[in-house]
Image (tube, rainbow, N blue to C red):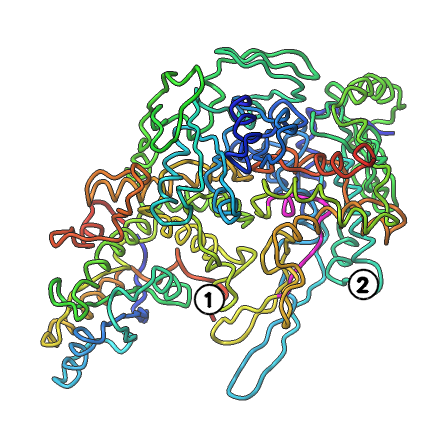
Amino acid sequence: MQVKDQNFKPLVVSFCCNWCSYAGADLAGSSRLEYPAEVKIIRIPCSCRVDPLFVLRAFQRGADGVIINGCHPGDCHYTSGNYFTRRRMTLLFSMLDYLGIERERTRLEWVSAAEGARFAKVMNEFVGKLHEMGANKRLGDIRCKE
Amino acid sequence: MRQKAHELLSSGAVGAVLAWEKGELPYDTSPAVFRDAEALDKMVYNGFCGSNLSKYLIEQGKQDEKVLVFLKPCDTYSLNQLLSENRVAREKLHIIGIGCKGKLDVEKLRTQGIKGITGIEENETLKIQTLYGDHELPREDVLLEKCLSCKGKDHKVYDELIGEDLSADTEQGDKYAKVAELEGQTPAERFAFWRGELSKCIRCNACRNTCPSCTCLKCVFDNAHSGVAAKVNATEFEENMFHIIRAFHVAGRCSDCGECSRVCPQGIPIHLLNRKFIKDISGFYGEFQAGETAELNSPLLCYDLEDAEPNIISKREGDN
Amino acid sequence: MLKLSLSRMEELFSRINGERTLYAPIQIGEQTQFTPWVPDAAVQMNRLSTVKSPKDYFFPHIEDIAAFRVQGKEIEILDVRTEAAPFAVFGVRACDAESLNLLDRIFLDDPIDTFYESKRKSGLIITTACFEPEETCFCGVFGIDALSPGGDIATWIVDDTLYWNALTEKGEALTEAVKDLFEETDDMAVKAAQEKAQTVFDKLPFRDLNLDGLTGEVLMKKFNSPEWANLNPSCLSCGTCTFICPTCHCYDIQDFDTGKGIQRFKCWDSCMCSDFTLMAHGNPRTSQLERFRQRYMHKLIYFPDNNDGAYACVGCGRCVQKCPISMNIVKVIKALGVENDV
């Protein structure tokens, strides 16, 4: 069992779709809901813009977890983008698991523009889990460390 | 085969023949393009013609002529995939389906300590002459990895079929056995396994270049503007990244022809990455075999409203 | 000449390993690779060619050459060069030992590559003779005697005895340090084994490979040979042959942005890569045929033309074994050489 480092602050890259989740994050902020400052939000036009390379690059450059947020199934601004995301990310996450990368480091969530509270809750949960797990050691690039 | 090729080439029905050429040693056949009927004497088809000729059709298809190509049953899946993606024009091809009893892997002879190979007689038992004496081995002990889970004897696309051994029965091993074994391990064990394998990678790109599904005009790993182009795996991360992305890019398009593992100079079981995707796709979205038909039907190009959510991965049992 | 029973090899290895890192051909999975020796490692003395050559230890696949730290508008240049730590490579074959002499011509010529020089100085090569060549071997074609290998120390394994002979000052120094393990002996047993093995060498399929007609004088003729168009189509343009080759020495210099600065490194390049010799204005070789031709013209024409006739090939046979589609230098020599010259 790994000894937990209390000072460890997991770095999270959170991809948010422009139409739902980004607005959801915005609502979380304007509603003054708290979620960890280590969550770095990257706005994307649609969750299906997330190339598997984006996820890997986030890990390479020091992320401890990567979460992709999109519109709920059926609500995609482009009708079907998030359905493609769902298939792609299911396969990618499964592959990372297959390679022995901890499966809780990657996540896909559906967050609508009205779900500020849900956004904060998801982030808090995700960061909490990463805090338990500790730093990403299996999929980082030593050159990008201090 | 040679006679047929001769006929078509001299009559002008085809401008080129894509087949295998005899090498300098008993096992070193090379894919070759024959344009001259005289040169067809060098054409060969034996147990060491494991290479998949489908990919060469992309380059050959650019010529303004019809090409005669010889395909083994498993090669036709790759060709179908290329046809479905419009990478090769069907009307430029004359496809002759040829039989296959499983192809042989000279590396397997070497790992069994056989060296100095100067002659190989192919039968159910292989008779191998070497500089240090003769050996006999059952053919099935020397089969290529890909032939251990053969897709069967049916050609999925062809203009005609020739060859007397078309009906050869092939072994149908469980292609997911090793994938399932790995899935049953703990993530730490899997991580250790893949570190051991992927750390051998010298980034020669043979797996990518031989892959009939890798058809990008400019690969992301060759594109200086992509931010991930590299000629070497500088760190463990790059080893992982290259193999994840390579496998992901052919997910839903890979027909499991096994060329990637065959060509790897370091013996990395690359096919186990592809098969993981195939297994997942078949498990999540219904049984799928790329290249079964020439229709464009990759499971990553479509969706179902009721698809599984990715949290089926994070909810899997077991520790990290 | 000195001798040592093979049963005491472990002792010898650990003694050599004491003051320097020792690399040896060690079996990993189904393959044999030069890797750092550890006690009880499965050192393979019978498998001739490792997948990669020991070139790695002198001219690594990747090597940092400088780093830049960026802070605001300040850029600090960091010198990351280090003196190479002493090391020895055991079990190098005659062909691979000769390949280092070829690399010397490139990297130790003016301007000297200090990274290579430092490793060459601190590295010690212990060769071993090949008594059982593979069918893919053709070092003899390039005048290499696999039965009397070069390096700093040459060894011969006959039955269950290792015979040891220092060839250079460096080799003498190491020999002094481990001499107490050995016994003095004459070279009769080695001579007898050499004579016996010679009969095998005389039967190798590529022993008569003819290099006549491959010289700088016919450069343009070979360059424009129609044979290239026949040879090239099978090539997958992967880099296998260049990366496993003991004599290939092209490298590229690249930068990696770490987010906090830059790491500049050199890494092996391959003429098979589409961006090989890519410059600001574009690439002088745009087709696969040109790149394929470059590889063999370099080895068989340009290199000997610039280096007193020495070919940039040592006949180790790795490309013959490992090319995914078996298009190798032997086929090219046969197609381009004098036999096809009408």
* Relative side of C136 to C199, left or right: left
Q: Residue B319, position in %: x, y?
A: 25, 48
| Disc 2 element | loop
| Disc 1 element | loop
Q: Residue A115, position in %: x, y?
A: 10, 74
Q: Residue B90, position in %: x, y?
A: 39, 42
Label 2 sits on what residue type? Ile
The residue stretch that appears in magenta: C240-253
Depth order, front residue of C214/C175: C214
Going 63% across and 78% down the picture, which residue do you hit?
C77
Up-down relation of residue C180 to residue C267 (above or below)? above
* Relative side of C269 to A63, left or right: right
Magenta stretch containing residue B232, yes or no?
Answer: no
* Relative side of C95 to A16, left or right: right
| Residue at numbered disc 2 | C112
Instruction: Say whether mark 2 and mark 1 are on the same chain.
Output: no
Chain ID at mark 1: B
* Relative side of C313 to C286, left or right: right
Residue B10 in view:
yes
| Residue at numbered disc 1 | B226
Q: Residue B274, position in %: x, y?
A: 36, 42
Residue C40 in view:
no
**Res. C165 image quadrant:** top right
Label 1 sits on what residue type? Ser
Q: Residues within 10 Å of mark 2 (few under 14, many from 20)?
A: few
